[in-house]
Image: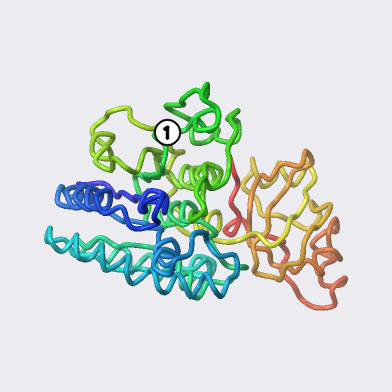
Amino acid sequence: MGQTIVVKIGTSTLTDSKTGNLALSTIASLVETLTYLRKEGNRVILVSSGAVGIGCARLGLRERPRNLHLKQAIAAVGQGRLIRVYDDLFSQLGQSIAQILLTRRDFVDRNSYVNAFNTLNTLLELEVIPIVNENDTTATDELKFGDNDTLSALVASLVEADWLFLLTDIDRLYSADPRLVPSATPIDVVDGGQVDELEIEVGDSGTPLGTGGMKTKLKAVKIAASAGVTTVITHGKNPENIVRILQGEEIGTRFTALPKTGNARKRWIANGLISMGRVYLDEGAVEAICRQGKSLLPAGVVAVEGKFNSSEAVDLVNPQGKVIGKGISNYSHYELQQIKGKKSAYISQILGYQAPQTVIHRDNLVIFD
């Protein structure tokens, strides 16, 4: 049986750096590669940036606009052109595609998340290649992915992918940006669970029309690794290298995956939900939830940070200040401030109404290794 492969390509690779026009030879090579992988029995998803960049080129703008409404309008101009080019090239090879536009809300809302999962899986079963992009025309600042590196990692987690390929404008991860530091050393293999321990200098987008950079790619790697997805960062100008990597060649930087979990709900909590606050725990609570598999009780909460409602996600922080988990709170920040440190038997008396005995039930709790 084939593998599930998610490929993300950025604006800097899709467009000519001087003119902002589409790099058609690169796109054609990408289309050939993805079609080959699909016909070999793999399930393939393409996450493609470029709508805003192409819109800027068509309207004669040299830099990505900062104004949200202007950016949304420009994305609307560019998205049609982008998908038309993909459709023309894939059609020549007899490969069907589908356009999927997502917002961060589609991952936060459980029903939308499940619907996205079902739609993508149905398309893959129909041997279609979904082409995914953020819906820039409707997304708000509060609910944006911010970059397609993050979107691609969330999609890879959603469909339980085997591989995530981040195609960029350099050939691999380096200890520093090789364009600025010629002595930077290449990095070939990284344990996906130790990304935070890398001693490297990373920056933001290197082009005026891009939104990513190595910083966002490493963030994406952590999301993908935690979902059991192997990630590779490699040069987007040579998309045919994807096939060679799958055949075992050591090209680019490979980030090994953590063990897959079969619990789809917990993957959604870990990667789909946005944390709205922080809950600080004592050592007893850390021991109970991390090593004994128990729910979080109010007695183990020492402090609350941020403003959140019940049924929203919060990060869990140990006494050393490290985020050790994430969960869906049964209480708002206001309620939790009143009952923190107290025994569950006193909750109803303190709040004046019947309420759950747990702050976060273990079924709604994810512990980070």
Q: Is residue 317 left or right of residue 139?
A: right
The kind of residue on which mark 1 rests is Arg
Whole-percent x and y of residue 338?
86, 66
SS of the residue under disc 1: loop
Q: Is residue 158 left or right of residue 331?
A: left
Placement of 97 over or under 166, stated as above or below? below
Q: Residue sitting at 47 percent across and 42 percent down?
A: 225
Picture quadrant where residue 342 is located: bottom right
Whole-percent x and y of residue 173?
47, 33
Protein image colouring: rainbow
Whole-percent x and y of residue 90?
19, 60
Front-most of residues 23 and 259: 23
Count of number-bearing discs: 1
Q: Is residue 219 left or right of residue 132?
A: right
Q: Is residue 52 left or right of residue 96?
A: right
Front-most of residues 248 and 199: 199
Image quadrant in which the C terminus is located: top right
Front-most of residues 20 and 350: 20
Placement of 317 over or under 277, stated as above or below? above
Whole-percent x and y of residue 333?
78, 66
Q: Residue sitting at 15 percent across and 47 percent down?
A: 40
- The residue furthest bottom is 353
Q: Would you name the residue on which mark 1 appears?
A: 172
Classify mark 1: residues with Cα within 10 Å, few (<14), some (14-19) or many (20+): many
Placement of 314 over or under 74, stated as above or below? above
